[in-house]
Image (spheres, coloured by chain):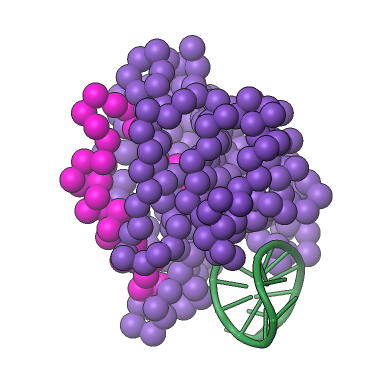
Amino acid sequence: MSLKIVTWNINSVRLRIGLVTRLLDMWKPDVLCLQETKCPQGQFPSAPLRDMGYHHIAESGQKGYHGVAIISRLPFVSEDVRRFCAKDDCRHIAVAVATRQKPVTINNFYVPAGGDEPDPAINEKFAHKLQFLDEMEKWFKKGSVPKDHEGVVVGDLNIAPLEHDVWSHKDLLKVVSHTPIETAGLNRVQAAGKWVDVMRQHVPADKKLYTWWSYRAKDWEAADRGRRLDHIWTTSGLAPACKELRILKEARGWTQSSDHVPVMARFAL
DNA sequence: ATGGTGGTCCTACCA
């Protein structure tokens, strides 16, 4: 048996439900984790997904902003919504799915983008981003994955931690998403849960790897000024089972695309 | 080059 998990910042699930079904048809994942659904709780466009066999949908949504959802062919054995930083933002949802082996707890995150100015003293959005990372770190330290489960973290973490996760390390050191204080924070989060970065298990750290290209470029593909903002981490027990890692770069060229592209990990279980 | 584009929901705010 294999478990295929896809993560995608969809930037409005109602506007782009046709791209979601296109992706499901192409890759046929078992589980799809979405971020920035921008869809109020209870108004999720579930009918076309159920028609494709995705009968299990967990959502945490609000009007206008943020929002995360998990769409699955596999039944959930548990479900959990958390609100980090004591805000009402819908930025995290977790489910556990049953597999032939251990159940797998899947955490889906949408980390705050953090605004433009990388200084928490003058930019409260950046301060919120750093606080959110601190909360994640504390929560993972306590142990967020049940002892008899394996675990996965996916989502738009809005940080490109490695030198080759951005088109120019030097030019982006002072740009929110690649500043040292953010990458240090993300590294602490990762260490707190002993998470393995399975994307970089498949693509060496000295090779460029992007999941996001700005809408503001005249020609995103020619400029190729990308960043790796979307991530897939697993517990060390699950990492060796990750046999395939794919980034659907062509989705960035689809009509009315998201600025993020889908990332897929396949696990042999 | 302190712009550029895009989504939400109607006026700015967020990315």
Q: Residue at x 26, y 41 (%)?
A: A144
Quadrant containing the C terminus of chain A is top left
Percent x, y of residue A57: 53, 37
The answer to whether residue A160 is seen in the rendering is no
- Count all numbered tags in the image, as a single digit: 0
Please provide the residue range marked out in magenta: A126-155
Query: Is residue A144 covered in magenta?
Result: yes
Query: Is residue A250 covered in magenta?
Result: no
The outermost residue toward the front is A42
Instruction: Tell whether A34 sits left or right of A233.
Output: right
Q: Residue at x 27, y 35 (%)?
A: A145
The outermost residue toward the left is A142
Q: In this rendered view, identify the residue nearer to me: A38 or A216.
A: A38
The answer to whether residue A7 is seen in the rendering is yes
Q: Which chain is green?
A: B
Percent x, y of residue A102: 32, 19
Q: In this rendered view, identify the residue nearer to me: A75 or A34.
A: A75
Q: Is residue A130 above or below residue A119?
A: above
Q: Residue at x 35, y 15 (%)?
A: A101
Percent x, y of residue A261: 63, 45
The outermost residue toward the right is A255
Q: Which chain is purple?
A: A
Percent x, y of residue A227: 56, 54
Task: Answer with the quarter of the image where residue A193 lies.
Answer: top left
Task: Answer with the quarter of the image where residue A17 lies.
Answer: top right
Q: Residue at x 51, y 75 (%)?
A: A116
Instruction: Tell whether A226 sits left or right of A239.
Output: right
Q: Is residue A21 above or below residue A103?
A: below
